[in-house]
Amino acid sequence: MSTSQNPMWNDPEVVANYRPVERVTRPAGELLIKQTGILSEKAAQLVVLDNACGTGVISRTLYEKLDAAQKATLELTCGDITSAFVECMENVIATEHWTGAKAEVIDAQATGLPSNHYTHVITNFECVRILRPSGVFAGTFWEHLGWIDVMEKATATIPGAPEYPKRAAIMSLMSDGTWDSRSWVATTLEKQGLVDVKIDVQPMLLKWVNLKEFMDSTFPKAMAIFPLKLWAKDEQEKYGPSLLPALETFLSNNANFNRRSNAVYKELTSDSSVDAAKHTIAHLLPPYTAGTVIHNNGCATVMPSQYLNFPDKHVSYSFSNFFIAHLEENHDPAAKQVSRTLELGGTAIVSTWAAMAHGEPIKRAHLETRGPDVVFP
């Protein structure tokens, strides 16, 4: 929606502190750009509108990923209704010497831009009018907002406070449509005249090293605004000031920030299973962060898997030999312990000894859902 409808965006402090939020929005933006196919467009000039551009995460990603020939003829308009964001983008364009780029104050719901002009428009429906025939419209929508669950639990720690607003109520404040429904999104886009609509749902697991990093990059001020719109006035006045302190306290007491890594890997034998496991660690897993906790299950220690003493949701990656049958039969005590100790989004990597030794596919299990096989090269 147009930011003119939400007074939050007129707060200078909000605008000034918005840049760290790119920690959350950039991964989605990169997926969006990939889906448009714009990076492979070589034949014609690219004329792009980054509508509701904010601090320019889409535009910045484009200038980083387009090749020199594409950037040489690129025409990019960075539009936002908030003048502070536009000023921010003007500074970025000047500082980073983006040729072909400009920033303008633009209302996403009534852009005033020429029809049939852009090859690619990234965000709103007014954009359909200004797209060229065969142009590409691209947008991102949150299907699930993970911070709602956190705020519900944090708010529950405030004595006497009403419940944090439910997800449906929050989504209705953010827009007048059910943008978290894939079928509704597809139908709505088609009604606007778009064809070949593709919806790609991508899960994003984000990790923060400490509380400050989380608070800086998840925009907690916005989290606190929703109850102030949906609670009664006396509830707003009485409990509103306690929301963010309650969030900080809840996270300090419950989040696994600043966890120290356990042993990354212990060699069990001297045969080729060791090489297979090393390959898994080096090539199949994302880069480890300071908060990664890895458990090498079945490493001949005195901690049988059915008696794991890790806290709940503590382990990021769990490696196991001789364990496939246990994960397939989830009632098994050992499997239940691995599921209990894996954090949300954690990965259990399991294999039989023969599969490890002979380089056959490693079976990956994401919590209780079997993931794809990954074959050694």
Image (cartoon, grey):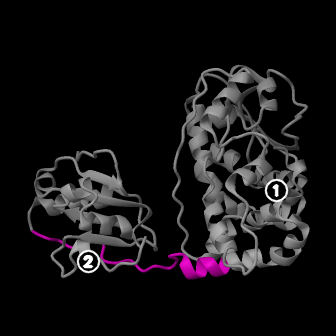
- Give yes or no for residue 163 being in the magenta stretch: no
Q: Which mark is residue 307?
A: 2
Residue at 64% of width from left, 30% of height from top? 186
Count residues near mark 1 (Cα–Cα under 10 Å), then give few for <14, some for 14-19, many for 20+: some
Disc 1 target residue: 88
Task: Please identify the quadrant where the N terminus is shown.
Answer: top right
Q: Give x and y (percent) for residue 184.
A: 66, 33
Foreground residue, 252 or 21?
Answer: 252
Tell me where the magenta segment starts and ends, as one range. 248-269
Q: Give x and y (percent) for residue 28.
A: 60, 48
- Outermost residue toward the top? 133
Count residues near mark 2 (Cα–Cα under 10 Å), then give few for <14, some for 14-19, many for 20+: few
Q: Give x and y (percent) for residue 302.
A: 18, 82
Q: Give x and y (percent) for residue 353.
A: 12, 58
Instruction: Tell me the kind of residue under disc 1.
Output: Cys
Task: Please identify the quadrant where the C terminus is shown.
Answer: top left
The quarter of the picture where residue 194 lies is: top right
Residue at 61% of width from left, 26% of height from top? 197
Mark 2 or mark 1: whose residue is earlier in sequence: 1
Q: Would you say the magenta stretch is mainly helix, strand or loop?
A: loop
Residue 237 makes an appearance in the image: yes
Instruction: Tell me the kind of residue under disc 2.
Output: Tyr
Work out how far the residue at label 2 is from the one at label 1, CA to CA, in angstroms: 55 Å
Q: Considering only vertical position in the picture, is 95 above or below 159?
A: above
Q: Secondary structure at mark 2?
A: helix
Q: Image check: 109 left or right of 261?
A: right
Residue at 88% of width from left, 41% of height from top? 107
Foreground residue, 330 or 108?
Answer: 330
Q: Considering only vertical position in the picture, is 175 above or below 286?
A: above
Foreground residue, 40 or 323?
Answer: 323
